[in-house]
Each structure stands twice: as structure tokens, then as C-alpha cells.
Image (cartoon, coloured by chain):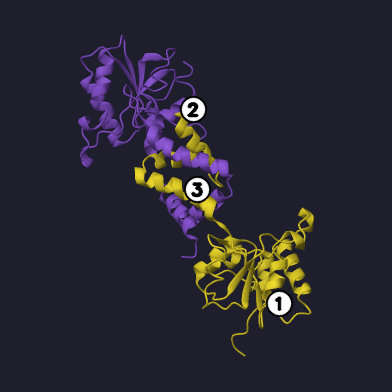
Chain colours: A purple, B yellow
Amino acid sequence: MYYPKDLETLINYYAKLPGIGAKSAERLAIATIDFSNEEIIDFSAALKNAKEHLTRCSICGHLTDKEICDICSEPTREQNLICVVEDYKNVFAFEKSGKFNGTYHVLNGLISPLDNIGPEDINLSSLINRIEHLQNPELILALKPTIEGEATTMYIKKILEDKQVKISRLAYGIPIGAEIDYLDNVTLEKALEDRKTISE
Amino acid sequence: MYYPKDLETLINYYAKLPGIGAKSAERLAIATIDFSNEEIIDFSAALKNAKEHLTRCSICGHLTDKEICDICSEPTREQNLICVVEDYKNVFAFEKSGKFNGTYHVLNGLISPLDNIGPEDINLSSLINRIEHLQNPELILALKPTIEGEATTMYIKKILEDKQVKISRLAYGIPIGAEIDYLDNVTLEKALEDRKTISE
């Protein structure tokens, strides 16, 4: 009860956010008070708008404020090249790199028998449906290298076996800038396995 | 432009907060979307309320949503014992410790000739005024041990010389739980200088 009530409410909301402890929440709330009136009104509106307007793209499942997201509706992007990701945050990561000119499909989860998450629990049937309407579709499976990621990758590969789809997965290897000493065994093993010939 | 507009606005506001970089701002904004509708409305209102209702106590300068703060208006607290602090965050720190039953005076800054901040730029005249209306006033100067803190401490001591005021400052020394090895020289020197006899 050492905070004025309105400040306390604000601190409690900041503290609900991931990675924000009691100390940080206090710091953020205090910093917020120093915002201008216009900023506060705008910030406050942004909270409501983000909650109200954001939905999932009806084609790929990405986060959007439209029926169909900007990526799916962009005519210059290769619609038959689909990068399959676990969640929409991955889309932001790829888009930031600016190196991919295809589209995405957001699974919104991974198959995980241990957690009782099966193929029907993730956004997969719409992917099959998309592929059936595309000419020479190509899938890039960009799922994380864990048991769940591998299981999902294998499942997608299997159900598309009899369809004409080119499928690849992201390369495994040493991340750029990493110290070899600190890499885990599995990464090193994969990097060795997938080593690339540079001179013969 | 890879974020939906409403999400981008929200990310930008989180990124304005201290210690929140672009990555964290994205993470916080995405977490916010998962709040319930009620939470969003409440959070949004808390932002506006905190900005609108919070002001400074007319007696001590502490942050409050009233004309006079809860601490100054609490009859059980020793009104003639005043802990002088740099800003209202310090008040929260003392109140959390729960070990102080006096009142505070928030200077809202420290004297700093280098930054052109003189005694008239901080909340000092109201402190002198308070003291003149108290019986046996006692001041605890809880200012940080920097050049500015020391300058302010010395100034307050000097202008109150001819008044009947007991003045002390916080003890300097080793913080509890610290490793002696990692302490700076000045702290060690102060801790030696102010050493306390425990047996004679």
C-alpha cells in the first residue's frame, strides 16, 4: 500500500507481462507517468486497438488486422512457395531478414504426443487445402529442431508423399558468430553431417 | 512494415519505456494481445488514470493522488522526523523496508553546479518552511553519496545552522550480502572510517 492506487494498478499490469518483475514493473509504470498526455491517450488506444483489430489471416494463419494478411495479398510474392512455421513470431523473424519472398503458413503449434497435441490440433488441414490449389507448390519446413519440430516435419512429409510437392527443411549447423567451444554436441554433429564441400 | 499497424503502434510505445529494446517491445506487445478484454480495458484505463490523477503532495512533494499524501496525512507517523530524499522512488524504497515511521521530503533533484542546478531549482524552500512550523524537528539526509548528493547535504546543513534542527545522514558502509573483494575503494574507506566498536 505504499503506491498511490492508480500507480499500483499500472504496476500490476506491467508485472503481468513476460519477463517483467516487480522492480521493472515499478520502473515502467513510473516512466509511463512521464509520457505526454497525447502519448498516453495514444498508447491507451493502441492497447485496445491491438486487442480488437488483430486476428488471423484466413489463408496462412498469420497475425493481421485484415481478412487476408499483407503477405498473402502481395502479388509480387511467390504464392506457391510456402514457409511453414510454428507461430506468427517466426514470420516476423523471417520478414526482418528480408530474404524470403514467398508466403508463410502458421501452424500455431507443433505435434506433441506427450502434450496430447495431434495433427488435428494445429493449423494443418488448411495447408493441405492450399497446396491442392497451387501449381508446383514448394514447402520449406522451418520448424525448430526439437522432438516436436521433427515429429511435425516428418508428419507433413508423410501426408504429402503422394502429392506433387517439393519439400525442404532449414539447414542445421553452426550459427553465424558462434564460438565453436560453446556449441552443444548435437549442433556440432549436425554441422559435421551436413558439411559443405568448398573445394574438390 | 512487417507488423500489422496496431501491433506496431503498441510495440513503439513499449519501446519508449526505459530498458525495453526492440525485441522486448515486440515480446511485450504480443503478450498484451493475449490479455483478456477486461484486462485490456482496465490496463488502458490505468494508463490514463495514472497520468491524470497522480500529482505531488503539497507538503512533502511525494507522488500522490490526493492533495496531501497518505504518509503526511497519517497521524501515527512522526511528523517532526523528516527523511530528505532525492526523488519519490526513494520513498517507495524506504516504505518497502517498513522500518521508518517518520515523514519524507522529496527534493526532486540535487544541487549540481555542473548541470546548472542550484538550491532554488529543487524543492528546498518548502522544507525550510516545514521545519519552521515543527517542534524539535529532526532531518535524516538520505541522499546518494555522489558529488551532487554531498553538495546538497552540505548546503542543507549550512542553511539550517542557526535553526534548532537535529540533522543526520545515512550511514556509509558495506552493503549487506556484499563480497568484500568486489567493493570499491571509497566504500571500503568509508566503512573503515565509520567502523563500529562491538567490544571494548
Give the residue type at disc 1. Glu
Q: In the rendered image, is residue A116 in sight?
A: yes
Residue drawn at x 48%, y 19% is A198
| Residue B79 image-quadrant placement | bottom right
User: Residue A92 at what x, y percent from top left?
Assistant: 44, 29
| Residue B160 image-quadrant placement | bottom right
The answer to whether tags 1 and 2 share a subunit is no
Q: In the rendered image, is residue B193 in sight?
A: no
Give the residue type at disc 2. Lys
Residue drawn at x 28%, y 36% is A147
The numbered mark at residue B132 is: 1
Callout 3: helix, strand or loop? helix
Q: Is residue A116 left or right of residue B199?
A: left
Q: Earlier in the sequence, mark 3 or mark 1?
A: 3
User: Residue B25 at what x, y percent from top left?
Assistant: 49, 40
* Residue underneath mark 3: B48
Callout 2: helix, strand or loop? helix
The answer to whether tags 3 and 2 share a subunit is no
User: Residue B197 at what x, y percent from top left?
Assistant: 62, 84
The numbered mark at residue A96 is: 2
Q: Is residue A113 left or right of residue A176?
A: left
